[in-house]
Image (cartoon, rainbow, N blue to C red):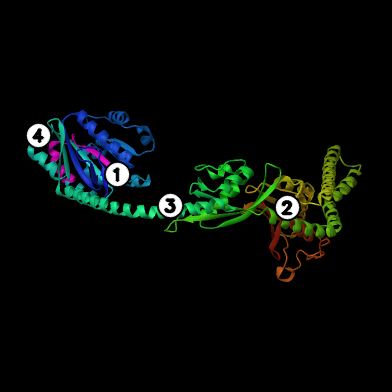
Amino acid sequence: MAEELRPTGIDVIGSIPWGTHFCHFYETKKDLLSILVSYFKAGLENNEYCLWVTAPHISVHEALTALKNGIPGFDRHLQAGRIEIINYTDWYHRDGKIDLKNAVPAILDRLGIAEQLNCAGLRANGDESWIDRKDWKNFIAYEKKLTPFIAQKPLIILCTYPLGQCVAAGEILDIALVHKCTVARRKGRLEVLEVPEIKRSKAQMQRKNELLQIDVAERTSQLAKVSSILGESQSQLRTIFNTTNIAFVLLDRDLKVLTYNAIARQWSLASLSKPLKEGVHFIDLLREDRKEPVIEMVNAVMAGDTVSYEISYPQLDGGTVWYAISINPVKDADDHIIGLCCSATNVTAAKLAELERVRISNDLVHRNKDLEQFSYIVSHNLRAPLANIISLSDMLKDNDISESEKNELEEFLFRSTVKLDEIVKDLNQVLQIRSDISEKKVKIIFSQLVDDILIGFRQTISKENIKIVTDFSQATGIYSIKSYLYSIFYNLISNSIKYRQPEVPLLVEIRSWIEGTMVNITFTDNARGIDLSIHGEEVFGLYKRFNTDTEGKGIGLYMVQHQVEALSGRISIDSKPKSGSTFLVGFPAS
């Protein structure tokens, strides 16, 4: 640290190493302000925390005014908290008396602030015109201790003394001896007196600079020879880079584009309708719905992972292009991540062939199961609203019910009828689009879906003190086929209600979140549960029942699994007898 030179802003001194304690003798207030403004200007411009302990003849306001007038952009440094101006009485005195014991800890405190602000170090000034003759001996002793104290620390301290108060030559000598360097105005100009340590340090630095210049000259000659070879290699590499059929984009740590090849520029225009430019923020090029997922993947790569995925983009001509994307970290020689390399390969032909094979296969499977599947949906999903309609109709036949009760029952009957109508319409819609399940998906809000389902269970929930808790804050919804998702939610919720433990109030918790490219939903209850060690392989089987004392056909979970898989999702269960069950359902986010 001792060899790192810092500019003082004082021409006759130039630069000095950290740990320097020097002083300045001035004649007038103008002289003092002139040298201190230059001194603090150099500190602020070199990322140092600055501390000015003012004298009796210069107020804090005067000091601020001088700095504002002499330092461009001073207000920015002041707002950033990188300079502090304090009155000498607040620094050197306590209870109206001089107290030098707290000065050193106060310096360490300011050095800590400098470190918190990521400053290079601390630059300080204290004007000593306030010293009384009776305190002179103690203060010189304090100044003497200060020099070894700040050695090897990122500290520079300039003490200023008025010549008018140092009337005796002995006092001037006292001051000069406890500082490494002394500056004074003589015959209208500044002169400097340095101690041997400063001179040796500067001489060593000068010698090192001379040796460095010789070394630079030699290395420059060597680099000139290597540069020619490197230029040829770069030309060859650039040719390969621009003629490959893989798009490459190189980003820095701030995700700004550093460079890219020709095919990347073409694909960006065709798929994003935006041109690639050096310096542009990569996220700004993406579609709005892709920004958040890509940011999550970028964060994973910045942590050291490699991300690969496939995605489709609509083209200006109305077609669709599929890309295989890979995002890899770029590391320096010390294995630190300094950026990202994004590559994209056009896999449209292979992807379309794969999708066609999957479509044909799925179509064959679904056509064979359509009749059975939809009969299950009808028998399972329509039971609750139909039962409600029958029950409410019977209750309305009772001539003893009041008019208000009758109105309420009619309202429930109307809602159940509307819900029944919606289910039938949804089924008709699904029947029309079964040839391609990926088409005509709509945005489904999970909270609305659950509210719709719970209408059919309102009486049971109230009577049995059932509690349904939802948390969809992490993923509010998804694009999917409404009737399928309704059936999945309905069956999982109705299973919890149907197989609740009689002696335990039922609690059902439904939560959603996004993980990678999947939207996950959990359905957790404290119902009877299933012994997976016995029935683990049969949980999603057709006509499989595990609680025979409760009415059921054993088709609900079978339906759920097949509907989840038809939506390219996945489902799993964790369950224990008398402890409840947790179903984890996952769907592709896009």
Q: CA distance from mark 3 to mark 2?
A: 75 Å
What residue appears at the point 81 percent right and 64 percent down from the top-left corner?
542
Distance of label 3 from label 4 (alpha carbons): 70 Å
On the rendered structure, is 229 left or right of 130? right
In magenta, the rendered stretch is: 122-143
Can you identify the residue that label 2 sits on? 466
Along the viewing direction, whichever of 246 and 574 lies nearer the viewer: 246
- Amino acid type indicated by mark 1: Leu
| The label number, if any, that marks residue 122 in the structure image | 1
CA distance for labels 1 and 3: 45 Å
N-terminal of the pair, mark 1 or mark 4, is 1
In the rendered structure, find residue 371 and report the number of the disc placed on it.
Answer: none
Amino acid type indicated by mark 4: Val
Q: Badges 3 and 4: C-beta atoms under 8 Å apart?
A: no
The tag on residue 167 is 4
Residues marked 1 and 4 touching at CB (< 8 Å)? no
52 in relation to 324, above or below: above
Is residue 456 at all visible to an observer of this figure?
Answer: yes
Residue occupying the far bottom of the picture: 534
* Residue at image mark 3: 231
Q: Quadrant of residue 123?
A: top left
